[in-house]
Amino acid sequence: MDSEALKKQIAGWEPTTEFVEEGSQYLNAIVSPPQLKALALKLREDEATHFNFMFSLTCVDYPEHMMMVYHLRSLNHKHEMVLKVKIDDRENPVVDTLCDIWRTAEYLEREVYDLFGVKFNNHPDLRRILLDDDWKGYPLRKDYVDPINIVSY
Amino acid sequence: MEAVKEKSDLKTQEYFVNMGPQHPSTHGVLRLVLGLDGEIITKVEPHIGYIHRSIEKMCEHDNYRQIVHLTDRMDYLSSHMNNEAVCLAVENALEIEVSDRVKVIRTIFSELTRLASHQLWWGVMGMDLGALTAFLYGFRDREMINDIFEETCGARLTMNYNVPGGVMFDLHPNFQQRVKDFVIHFKSKLPEYDLLLSDNVIFRERTVGVGTLSKEDVISYGITGPTARGSGVSCDIRKLHPYSAYDRVEFKEILMEDGDSFSRYKARILEMWESLHIIEQLIDNIPEGDIQAPTKALIKLPKGEFFQSVETARGELGVYIVSEGGKSPYRMKFRSPGFSNLFVLEHMAKGSKIADLVAMMSTIDLVVPDIDR
Amino acid sequence: MGIDIQQAQKNVPEDFPGQVIPAGNGGNIVVTSFDKIINWSRSNSLWPLTFGTSCCAIEMRQTGAARHDWSRFGFEVARATPRQADMIVIAGTIVNKMAPVLRRLYEQIADPKYVVAMGACAISGGPFFYNSYSVVKGADHIIPVDVYVPGCPPRPEALLYGIMQLQKKIRASSMKDESKSLEEFDKGL
């Protein structure tokens, strides 16, 4: 499916989705946290879109909000798209987990929790994965202060 | 397990054993906490982070030329391909067209790196299962590739040869002859690998039927590379989104049916033959041209997001750059193949014995700095 | 009569510390000092612990492989357990999470023990010196190091030279030196 057909399909399921195409080589669909789980399930189950392979899951920290970024690919139809979730609350970011839809999300979400502090609802085992268990703070956030190690210009 | 319990009146208790961060399977510093019932594994929990060097945070403070130097050290056995991923992302963002010569050189180096990585994997797999001779054979053949790299790039392992826009130096005059000699030499040595391990009765007993992965599991866990192709899932980035000179060479994507450890092993051996085939097609006609396309000294990417995947020896490495227009990325994320491949271990290993776990870990081919970044 | 010592020494290797005098009844008398003979035997049979964290580990294994063979120097057996090893070659970056593990491994090795820091990361943090929140900037913040081998990664020949320097250092030591304890190392840091 090309971008236009994908846009129509997704807008049919979730009319409030925002689509962005410039500045990126894929179609970006931006939703808000409550709409994420239902849309993700439909994207995987529906025969026409069939996004069965998630190849990247990450988070980007902006000054006013946080953006979760999911890169999806369909191995049958060979198309790709980006699903984004805009989390407005930077102090306490919470979003639904997608690990029952794509099993790879379980550990990628643990990494996002470790480095950014985003909590995931219904995650089977949410704890730190890369850093020590008693590490204070979330290093990849832009306001992480480490006067000894990090040189700022 | 139930039958055993019925026969004896002995009660067993689950206990935990630590395959600690320092252990002789030397895939790196990976800690596995195994829950065992006798010799049968009931739980595998990988603990990572013992080599987490915060490369992603460092990238936010470095400019793009410096980032290429850092990516060498992530999956150091496919160091050339890591560099290529970042350089391709930057070149696509700036819409720079590199010359044909650069594309062919990059492809030849990528395939040589893939061969070196698979040779080391083969040697270490033999060593893990107890066949120490395989270790010496694998490293002997790897030395020839290291010599070729050293002549042109100056370094053996972390080459740092790609720059955004091209490659750093021109090829050494001996390069073509040495690569041709190597290909002829290695074609006579690769059947030895089959004689030593693939046709060996003990090896087959330890790998056939061990650690089977179905297609649905592979897709759901996000596994890529020869680990996925051993279960029949077609996911080769060189075929899906061809880059550099892969659209002008002919090679097969190796797909195996059974999904057990032996299929994954066989997929890598056959990939070595395909790499030799690719090098043969390219080495005789390297086109003339510029080594570097003109770029500014301080590279600034336009505002936007860019994603580039390459096929490393372990799977799909993805580079995701979010740029706000400055000289450093706003956010740089590396989609590492090892991270997704590792966590299928629990699913594979439940119900088997510890010795099988070692065979399974070898065929997943982990490099732990790639997982931790 | 008398024993010709020069003649007797002809069959003895040159670097053997001491004189070998045949005693006449088929046996030999070895004349040397404790220091010399103990240092000679220790330096020629150092067993390393297989400890490699990242890229330098590959060059360390390449040193153990067929072309640059390190078992010519006596490091034949690379032990996996620290209780049976003599030295650690720290090949790779040490991060905050791994530091207690390295310390514990070092404490488990029996005296006399030696440490070789291989590669830029083990010497000073290497390419990860700036802006990394989790890298220990040099393994000598954790354990005392004897020899530093620079490079990123150092060539196998460089590692062999580093280990030969360690052998020289061992041969120059004496039983009269007091061995330094870890508490003194911690205080001096």
Image (spheres, grey):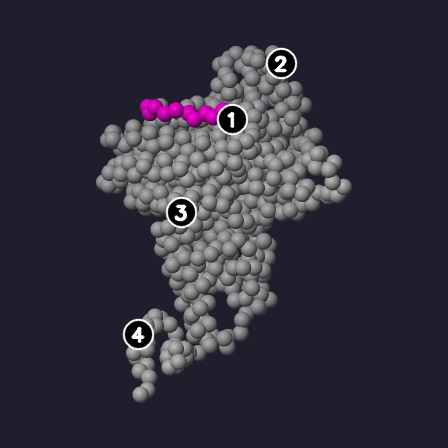
Report the residue at 59% width, 45% height from top: B31
Q: What amino acid type is highlighted by mark number 1?
A: Asp
In the figure, residue B266 lies in which quadrant? Answer: top left
Position of C175 with respect to B170 (left or right) is right
Which mark, by number, is residue B258?
A: 1
CA separation in Å, label 3 and label 1: 30 Å
* Mark linked to residue B136: 3
Q: Which residues fall within the magenta stretch? A: B248-259
Badges 2 and 4, same chain: no
Q: Nearer the viewer, residue B315 or B91?
A: B315
* Image x and y of residue C86, in percent: 50, 62
Q: Residues within 10 Å of mark 2 (few under 14, many from 20)?
A: few
Residue position marked by numbered label 4 in the rendering: C10
Residue A13 circle label:
2
Mark 2 to mark 3: distance in Å? 59 Å
For this rendering, which residue is in front, A14 or C175?
C175
Q: Amino acid at mark 3?
A: Leu
